[in-house]
Amino acid sequence: MGTAPKNKIELESQVLCAALRQSWAGTDPQGSATSARELYQLFPDLLPPPRLEGAGRLINYYEVLHVTPQVSSGMAVAGFFREAKRLLRAQSVKEHREDYNRILDAGFVLRKPRLRLSHDLMVVRGWLIQTKTIPEDGTLELVAAVREPEAEVQLAKTQPIVAELPSLVRLLKEAQIIGPAEVQALTAQMALAPEVPIERLVLDSGYVTQQEMYSLKLAETLLEQGKITMAQFQVAMYDERTSGIRMAESLQVRGWLPVEVSSRQSEEGA
């Protein structure tokens, strides 16, 4: 995101993350459930369904690094270095590889905003289930507020996926880059901040790289002009994501696109 001004989604998520971590650290289950529910509305792709069988206790990486949930990213990194040095000085990594790997995982996850939020949501959900604040199925609704327990529900009451999606989102789905949870996340984010371009939402979510975005935008144009089919796009985009061949080049090599269009994409992506 660099030094660009924060958009409404970034500001909203920062406020909600701070509220989640504050209520979690303060052992306020109801406050945590409320914040988790609102974050899930925006980022359903960051909270996978709970593991129902053979589920071991989720690792709380804050406990691993001996820091509190409210710490900044920088403080989490400092905690990682402190714990890594402590283990290296006191023990053999070879004999305590599992402990060392856990510290490495904690440092990596807690310094990445999306990974950290996903971690927080999963661990908090486990805590809320344990304290019987929410049902055992992981639905982010307070137990006292659940009036129809036998009804089929999602993890939280979320915005329905709209029928008409932006063409870029449809292409991401067709290329199997995103699934229903990601579509739901983008839909909620578009509803909250319609002024933010869909391209930025996709890039900020890390679904594609900037170069892949160039290919997707070109595919939009080519499909609108009838120069390629959806099936051809899917094959060429698969090539780009698995073998590193640019989508336009794949289309050209397969004889589906004139050479000059491939050259134009290279100029746009330079």
Image (tube, rainbow, N blue to C red):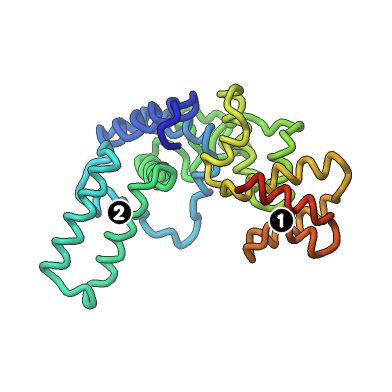
In this orientation, which residue lies closer to the viewer: 246 or 1? Answer: 246
In this orientation, which residue lies closer to the viewer: 167 or 159? Answer: 167
- Taking the spot 50% from the left edge, 36% from the top edge, the residue there is 40
Horizontally, residue 30 falls left or right of residue 251, namely left
Label 1 secondary element: helix
> In front of the other: label 1 or label 2?
1
In this orientation, which residue lies closer to the viewer: 251 or 28? Answer: 251
CB atoms of marks 1 and 2 within 8 Å: no
Label 2 secondary element: helix
- Taking the spot 75% from the left edge, 61% from the top edge, the residue there is 250
- Upstream in the sequence, badge 1 or badge 2? 2
Q: Is residue 243 above or below residue 30?
A: below
Give residue 189's position: percent from left, percent from top. 57, 30
Q: Is residue 21 above or below residue 115?
A: above
Reading the image, the residue beneath label 2 is 107
Q: Given the image, on which type of amino acid does mark 2 rest?
A: Gly
Considering the image in quadrants, where does the N terminus appear? top left
- Callout 1: few (<14), some (14-19), or many (20+) C-alpha neighbours within 10 Å? many
Asked whether the viewer can see residue 196, the reply is yes
**C-alpha distance separating marks 1 and 2:** 35 Å
- Callout 2: few (<14), some (14-19), or many (20+) C-alpha neighbours within 10 Å? many
Disc number for residue 247: 1
Give residue 74's position: percent from left, percent from top. 26, 43
Give residue 197's position: percent from left, percent from top. 61, 29
Horizontally, residue 230 falls left or right of residue 74, namely right
Disc number for residue 257: none
Res. 127 image quadrant? top left
